[in-house]
Image: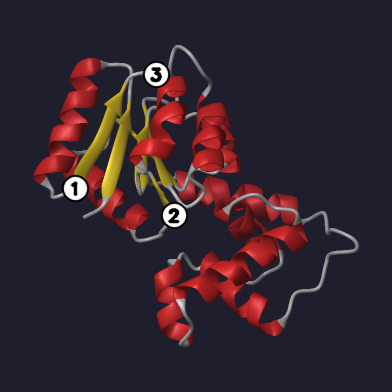
């Protein structure tokens, strides 16, 4: 069962999201209204996925995302926000969010996004995916000099990460253990001086590996 933490400062919205997820078969390990509280308890409740409102009264959304990923680096984060502003989307993704959905989305669209993010996909409200990819393409227009060399295996795994496959799926496809895949990814992150899976996907796009 996928373990989910819901973070939203509006009680009725938070309770409604938690209820929809429970009815869909997810385990709600926490439902809180403050970003600092979410970061503080993440290590104890160990969510597989966090549904996060981007604008909370105590901490900025990107700060919360970075804090959650520092504690739980494999946690996937789906932002569920009233804002569809381009800068908000880019700031969230740059910080490490796996997906971004505006709150005008219907229940089924929301549950589908949660399912896909839990499986390792990057999911965005229609129109926002192109924005994010376009920004990555723009960044790729300035080539990096002295990029470190990766092994063939690291490059192969990086390409599959960029396609949105989970570590488990990559392990099955390449007939490797889950731990071996994780080790390759951690080695790649270290070589590239990156911090999380989303930054790794961006690097892969920049290098034309997607």
Taking depth in this image into account, of 65 and 110 the one nearest to the observer is 65
Total labels drawn = 3
Helix, strand or loop at mark 1: loop
In the image: residue 24, left or right of residue 173:
left
Question: Which x, y percent locates residue 31?
Answer: 27, 28
> Which residue is outermost to the front?
44
Check residue 122 in the rendering and tell me which mark sits there, or answer none: 2
Taking depth in this image into account, of 25 and 87 the one nearest to the observer is 25
> Which residue is outermost to the right?
146
Q: Which residue is mark 3?
A: 34
- Name which of mark 3 and mark 1 comes first in the sequence: 1
Taking depth in this image into account, of 19 and 125 the one nearest to the observer is 19
Report the residue at 51% width, 51% height from top.
Answer: 130
- State whether residue 165 appears in this view: no
Check residue 167 in the rendering and tell me which mark sits there, or answer none: none
User: From the image, which quarter does the N terminus lie in?
Assistant: bottom left
In the image: residue 50, left or right of residue 148:
left
Do the residues under discs 2 and 1 have CB atoms within 8 angstroms? no
- Name which of mark 2 and mark 1 comes first in the sequence: 1
Q: Which residue is mark 1?
A: 26
Report the residue at 59% width, 59% height from top.
Answer: 201
Taking depth in this image into account, of 44 and 163 the one nearest to the observer is 44
Q: Label 1: few (<14), some or many (≥20) within 10 Å?
A: some
Helix, strand or loop at mark 3: loop
Quarter residue 104 falls in: top left
Between the C-alphas of marks 2 and 1, the distance is 19 Å
Report the residue at 46% width, 73% height from top.
Answer: 178
Between the C-alphas of marks 3 and 1, the distance is 21 Å
In the image: residue 86, left or right of residue 167:
right
Q: Is residue 80 above or below residue 168?
A: above
- Name which of mark 2 and mark 3 comes first in the sequence: 3
Q: Label 2: few (<14), some or many (≥20) within 10 Å?
A: many
């Amino acid at each position: 069962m996928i373990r989910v933490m819901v973070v939203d400062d509006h009680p009725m919205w938070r309770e409604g999201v938690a209820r929809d997820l429970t009815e869909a078969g997810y385990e709600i390990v926490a439902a809180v209204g403050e970003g600092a509280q979410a970061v503080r308890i993440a290590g104890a409740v160990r969510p597989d996925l966090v549904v996060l409102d981007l604008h909370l009264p105590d901490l900025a959304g990107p700060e919360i995302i970075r804090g959650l990923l520092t504690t739980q680096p494999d946690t996937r984060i789906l932002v569920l926000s009233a804002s569809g502003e381009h800068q908000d989307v880019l700031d969230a993704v740059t910080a490490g969010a796996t997906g971004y959905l505006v709150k005008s989305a219907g229940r089924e669209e929301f549950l589908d996004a949660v399912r896909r993010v839990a499986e390792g996909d990057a999911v965005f409200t229609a129109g926002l995916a192109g924005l994010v990819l376009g920004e990555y393409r723009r960044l790729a227009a300035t080539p990096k000099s002295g990029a470190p060399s990766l092994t063939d295996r690291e490059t192969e795994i990086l390409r599959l990460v960029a396609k949105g496959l989970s570590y488990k799926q990559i392990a099955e496809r390449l007939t490797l253990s889950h731990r071996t895949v994780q080790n390759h990814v951690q080695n790649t992150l270290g070589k590239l001086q990156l911090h999380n899976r989303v930054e790794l996907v961006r690097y892969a796009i920049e290098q034309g590996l997607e």
